[in-house]
Amino acid sequence: MEKTDHGLRPRRTGGPTVYLAGDSTVASRPIHEKPSFGWGSHLGAELNTLVTCRRVERGLPPLTVPVCNLAQGGASTESFRESGLWGELLRLVHIDDIVLIQFGHNDAKHEHLAADGQYRSNLGCFVDEVEAAGATPILCTPVARRVWDGATLTDTHGRYPQVVRELATERSLSLIDLHAMTHALYERLGPEGSVEYFTHRAPSTQFPDGLRDDSHSSFLGSRTIAEYVADAIVDGVMATADSTADATGPVTGGTRTVDSITGSTIRQLTHGRAHSVHGYYDLPPWSRTDGRIAFSRHRGSSDGEICVMRPDGSDLTVVARSAAMTANDGAMPQWSADGARLYFRDVDERGPLVATVDMATGGVDSLPGDLRMMRPGHDELVYFTDRARHDDETVRRTKATSGVVIRSFTDVEERTLATVQDALDIHPRRAEIADWHLYIKHTKWSPDGQQLMFVFTNEKFYDTKFAELPRVKDLYSVNADGSDLRRLGEFGNHPSWHPDGRRLLANAEFGDRPGYSLVLIDARTGERELATDAIGGHGHPSFSPDGRWIVVDHVIASEGMATLNLVDTADHSVRELVEVAVTDHSHRGTHLHPVWSHDSRSILFASDATGYSQLCVVDI
């Protein structure tokens, strides 16, 4: 975008531009006014997500629809013209563009701008001038406020919304009734449930007296309204784009963009308003037999879909549903070695399940149990007793029964490979930590399926809560038959196997190097060596299957950005592969989780740069 005196000058793309005229409930708010947001702040992302999805489904190349938000806090139909903003909009607008108009909050504060008087007249003039420019005006009623009288939501706008409706009918104009939509939404949520849609804050340094604003939307509220507006206008935008945009160069699946920083080509395989996530950075989503990609798709809840698509993002098919989704990992779908079945997590009223899909027949079956990783080359899985399903006291007292569990699909019996107590018995601090809240996580098979690693810890949930410090966090290895349990020592985070199956890669302290480094740990002896001194230890590092490369993600959440970095293990050089925006890098949001393809030629990662987690691939 190029700067103008009052806002942004949209770069023409061949399709329409959407312009916004309105007040603070629409405006992109200045930083000192956050955490309130106008819905116009999100409309570009929401609308372009829908447009891209629609065009890709029809075999057309992506098209960016610029959204130029000229709305201003405090504006009325009168002051918006007097400030010069309306004149600027008319100078920018072209034939076939779309202009959304929403006023009323501030007009109601001025006696001479009465709903059936000057307010109606001003809106009518706006419509005349947009139509004279060859563009399409769309009227929006003002969004509702959150004002409750007991259990009744009060309408504070009087005649203003109805005047907009009447004018739209009289002039045969498109109408987006945001007042009706938001009023119904807040009524359904109730006095308490509607709070998170507005800017309420407890007393703090930033807001010494707290904040209670029932006119301006929070991030959630403004984004919800923007989704509704995008739904309302996408058909018109698509129709205009079809008639004006260059539709040459059909695509077969995902879309391609070039990273402006690194020059890498990124293929975005998924689109739309659902969150698409793969399993984890150590679980390649590609089938070894035909390259199809398995992934989870959800809308922020525990219910979602298990999907399969071709490597280019085409032929996306929903093959099953799961009620055991998590934000970062979905239901962790994994292929059988022969590509004939998909395994994934599920749950019902009886407890956790491991479900399977027969890819030939579409039949779904399930067994009681959990899923972390399928054993390479075997119809067998490993998981760990989930501490989240037990209260604190149960975690502390069930060390002899909690641990690493193996299940074979040819034998319904489970067997425990190692327990928390087994790990405790060989720990050098066993006397000190004997009564602590300890648990096991991150059970991972070696590439040949002959060994397991796991993490023995009390971190995050119990270390500070019960003053069990210094914390316990150690790596262990054990053979697939349960023999030769070994403690490999303390480490930092995110361990994975080296392709040789003899060593582990982890973020850990090393010598006098500051912070964490990328450290290789011998799975038999615990001896350590530096994997590379070219980059620090952070993110979710992993070796390519051929051992040539290490990929490391580095997230700077405070800056809203992340990079994928490629380390050459031959000369220890580092190349930045991708730089992407980050919306919510949390365990309730999206982690990149870069994962290697089986042939070491591609890396898949999840990106929420659009506001929704999408699966992307970059080639080496």
Image (tube, rainbow, N blue to C red):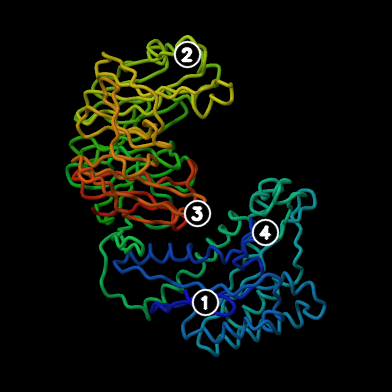
Q: Amino acid at mark 4?
A: His
Tell whether label 3 touches label 1 (CB within 8 Å): no
Q: In the orientation shown, which residue stands out farthest toward the right?
A: 111
Nearer the observer, disc 4 or disc 3? Answer: 3
10 Å crowding of disc 3: few (<14), some (14-19), many (20+): few
| Residue bearing mark 2 | 398
**Which residue is the site of mark 1?**
3
Give the spatial CA distance, label 2 vs label 4.
51 Å
Name which residue type carries label 2: Thr
Query: x, y percentage for residue 546?
Result: 18, 41
Lower position in the chain sequence, tag 1 or tag 3: 1
CA separation in Å, label 2 and label 1? 63 Å
Q: Is residue 264 above or below residue 464?
A: below
- Above or below residue 546? Residue 123 is below
Whole-angstrom CA distance, mark 2 to mark 3, is 43 Å
**Side of 124 relative to 601 (left or right):** right
Write down the quadrant of residue 86 in the picture: bottom right
Q: Secondary structure at mark 1?
A: strand
Side (left or right) of 85 relative to 407? right
Q: Tell me where residue 255 appears, x and y as whole percent.
A: 31, 62
State if disc 4 and disc 2 touch (CB < 8 Å).
Answer: no
Q: Which three-letter amino acid code belongs to the residue tagged 3?
A: Glu
* Amino acid under disc 1: Lys
Q: Residues within 10 Å of mark 2 (few under 14, many from 20)?
A: some
